[in-house]
Image: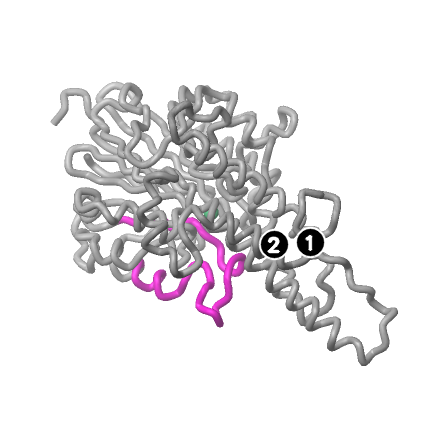
Amino acid sequence: MASDAPRRLTVRTYDVGFGDCFLLTFHYANRERHVLIDFGSMSWPKPKTVKGDYALRIAEAIREDCGGKLHAVVATHRHQDHISGFERRGGRGPGEIIRLLAPQIVIRSWTEDPSAPTDATASSRRGFTRTLLGMQEVAGQVVQAAAGLRGERLRGLREQLRAIGMDNIANRDAIENLQTMAPNRYVHHGSNAGLGRLLPGVRTTVLGPPTVEQAASIGTQRRTDGDEFWHLSQVFWQRLAATGSASGSGARPLFPRHPTGRLPRSAGWYRYTAMKEQGDSLMSIVRMLDKALNNTSVMLLFEVNDTVVLFPGDAQYESWMHALGKPATRAKLARVNLYKVGHHGSLNATPRSLWRGFEQKGGARTSRRLATLLSTQAGVHGDPERRTEVPRSSLLRALKEGSRLTNTQEFAPDELRRALTIDL
Ligand SMILES: [Zn+2]
C-alpha cells in the first residue's frame, strides 16, 4: 500500500432527476479530497418536498458535503443534464456556489478545448470540434421547429424532439463558468488526467473519449452501418440538407409551419403525414447529435489498491468499443467494484460485453460485490414500444439482480443525496 493513500472512498449520488451529479470523497489519514463529477439536469425530480430552487439546494448540499472546498471538477460532456448546475445566472445560480468552492482543476473532453492543438493532426481535430458546435446550433432550431408539430397524434414526437433538442442546446453560461473557475485540462483516451498531485495513492486512467485519430480504426471497421464513429457529422449535414432546410442561416425555420385552420378538412391527413415525416427526419438528426455529444464523454477509472471505480459519463457503444478493444483495459474493467451506470440506464451505454465481464457482480452479498449507481428519471427519453426507454427495463433488472444498486428513482421525496462508502 502506498504510504499516503486514501483509506476509504465515499461516493454521494445527488438526486437531480434526469441528469448526473456525484461527489467522490477520498478519506486520507488526516484530510479529505473532493472530486465533483457532473452537475446538471434536464428534468428536475418531482414531486419533492424540498423548498426553493432545487438546483440551488443541490449546490448547497454539495458545499456542505465537501466542507466548503472542492479539489477537482469533472464535466464529462456538454449536455444540459451534466452541466446545467454550473450556470452562474449573473451570480445567483448554482454554478456560483460551485465556483466559490474553488476547485483546483476542471477536467473536460479534448473536444471542448478552445485552443487548437499544435500537432500535425490539428486540422482534423479542430474541424471536428467546429462541426460539433455547428450541430449544437441546429438543436436550438429543432426545439423551435418541434413547437410547429401540431395536434394530439404528434404529441409524443413533439415532446421527444423538444427534450432531446433542449438537452443539446449550447449552454454558454455553464461552459464559461467551467472554463474560468479553474485551469481546465482537456483529456482523451490514454492521456494524463492531471489528478496525481491532488489525489496521492489514486491511479486515474482516462478511458475516453478517443481522439479522431484513435477512433479512426473503429471508423473503418464500422463504415458499413452508416453510423461511423466520429464520422457522424457528414451524415448529419446530409440528412439536414434532405429536410430542405439546412443552411447557415439561423433565422430560417427548419421546416415551414403548416397553416392550420385554413386548409379544408380533407387536407388534414396530408398535413399530418407531411408533419410526421418532417418530425421523424428531424428526430433522426437530433439523435445523431445527441449520440455524437454523448461519445465525447470523459470516461474515468480510479484505482486505489485493488479497488476499481468507473465513471464513464454517457459514453455510448462506439466509444466503449474503442476502450474495450484493448485487452489490458478489458482486464482492468473486469475488476470494477463500483460502476456509474452509463447514460442514465439506456441500453446502448452499457455494452453487454462490459456487463458480462464484471467479475464482482452476482447474487453473493459479499463486501466486494459490485456496486452500481443509476441516476435517472423514467418517461423522459425513449419509448418502451421500441425498447429504447431510459432506463431500459432489462438493464434495470440485471442491475438489481447482479449488484448493489443505488437508484435515484427510489429516493424519498426529501432525500437530496445518498452516500455509499467503501473501504480501500
Ligand atoms: Zn446524460
Q: Which mark is residue 240?
A: 2
Where is residue 70, by image quadrant? top left
Q: Which mark is residue 302?
A: none
Q: Residue at x 24, y 49 (%)?
A: 325
Q: Residues within 10 Å of mark 2 (few under 14, many from 20)?
A: many
How many angstroms separate mark 1 from mark 2 (CA)?
Answer: 7 Å
- Three-letter amino acid code at the position of disc 1: Ser
Question: Image check: 27 left or right of 175?
Answer: left
Question: Image check: 196 left or right of 393?
Answer: left
| Outermost residue to the right | 262
Question: Image check: 174 left or right of 319?
Answer: right
Residue picked out by circle 1: 245
Is the distance from the Cβ of mark 2 to the nearest ligand 1 atom less than 8 Å?
no
- Three-letter amino acid code at the position of disc 2: Leu
Q: Nearer the viewer, residue 164 or 249?
A: 249
Quadrant location of the N terminus in the rendered image: top left
